[in-house]
Amino acid sequence: MNALHILYNGQIVTLDARQPRVSALALRDGRVVAAGSDADMLALAGAGSTRENLNGRTVLPGLVDAHIHWEWTARAMQQVNVFEVPSREAAAQRVAAFAARLPAGEWITGHGWSQEYWADRQFPDKSALDHAAPAHPVYLRAKSGHAAWVNSAALAAAGISASTPDPQGGQIVRGADGQASGLLLETAMSLVANAIPAPTPEQLAAQMLSAQQKALASGLTGIHDFDNPSCMAALQVLRERGQLALRVVKQINKAWLEHALALGVRTGFGDEWIRIGALKLFADGALGARTALMVTPYEGEPHNTGIVVTEKEEMLRLVAQASAAGVSATIHAIGDRAVHDVLDVYEVVRGQEAAPAPPPPPPPQRHEQ
């Protein structure tokens, strides 16, 4: 057993109602084993123990980000940053600068634009990106994550033409000529995203390692991840190398559910570093993309009440299937109609769970606004 490390002379917040603030902690092997006064904790020190004077500094429990897309986050740090750019032209200038450093034909990806920051508050089309990077396919996710802005090269790489149908739960926005405008909503985003060469688990793990350092420096010690199975593969690379320093609760997406249930995986399965969380579903989109599912139409768009990403009946089937196997569910729902649909689903499934077997944890609802 390793010796103790004593932190003393601090302002330590414990979140324990019995002693909410203490001045000292005793640690062993990265775990808190005791908390109390300087005198009590220093008295525990033995041969080989180390002591660290905090000099009055404040110590807080580690923070947990309860909803993050960790693969997106890690990859975005290596991409074009278009967060809060004041115009589509400013975003295009950043893309052009990025393109100047890349060989022709290589993909340019980025994240963070929002038309709400622009003077006209209008969605962009492909023209500005065509001018900025004519020799590169460009894919820029919106700040909301529910829309993508692409150029003609990206549309061509994905094989999108005027005859390409809208996918279920998504929309290829089109111009007056019927051609794709360069704006993709919800599941239509994947038509182009799936054409982008994916990093290997090792490459993604390297990107996550860089992102992890920033997370730790911000006080994060744990995350609830809502990204794809590719994220899980990279996390396991870090875990096997002993480089994973964030505790991760990994959600299961719809495509992964059948595989997980076939293996008997349940909510809570795993260890202290990586655990299985809930089934993640999308009921609708987002307000920024005007795809959140609403009871009444959006202002100025009398025919737009948002997009149904997952039909109510399908949500019910999936949530019931997961619940019966011990997997909780968490559903993205922003619009008022989507929130009602999700609550209806939970009500039905909760009724089905009134059986001898213990139900999975109560289902959270994400983003209700």
Image (tube, rainbow, N blue to C red):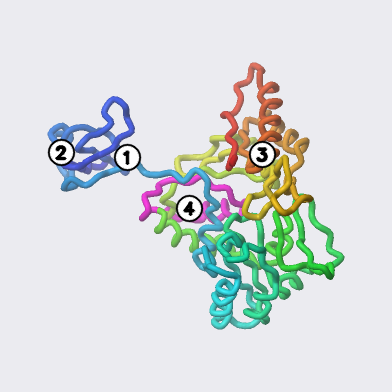
Marks 1 and 3, how far apart at CA: 44 Å
Q: Is residue 65 above or below residue 361?
A: below
Q: Which residue is mark 3?
A: 336
Left or right: 338, with 358 as reference point = right
Quadrant placement of the C terminus: top right
Marks 4/1: CA–CA distance: 21 Å
Tell me where residue 188 sits by quadrant: bottom right
Where residue 174 sits, quadrant-wise, is bottom right
The residue depicted at 55 percent of the width and 37 percent of the height is 269
Question: Could you say where residue 90 lies in the image, as x and y percent from the top left?
Answer: 55, 73
162 in magenta: no
Residue 224 versus residue 128: which sits nearer the camera?
128
Write the residue at 56% across / 83% down: 100
Q: Give the magenta part as a residue range.
A: 216-242
SS state under label 3: helix
Give the amino acid at mark 3: Asp
Residues under labels 1 and 2: Cα distance? 17 Å
Q: Residues within 10 Å of mark 2 (few under 14, many from 20)?
A: few
C-alpha separation, residue under disc 2 versus residue under disc 3: 60 Å
Query: At which x and y percent is residue 110?
Result: 58, 67
Q: Residue under circle 2?
A: 46
Q: Nearer the viewer, mark 4 or mark 1?
A: 1
For the residue marked with disc 2, what is the amino acid?
Answer: Gly
The residue where tag 1 is placed is 31
Instruction: Tell which circle, 1 or 3, labels the residue nearer the N-terminal end.
Output: 1
Read off the residue under disc 4: 240
Indicate which label's residue lies in the foreground, 3 or 4: 3
Give the residue type at disc 4: Glu
Q: Is residue 145 left or right of residue 314?
A: left
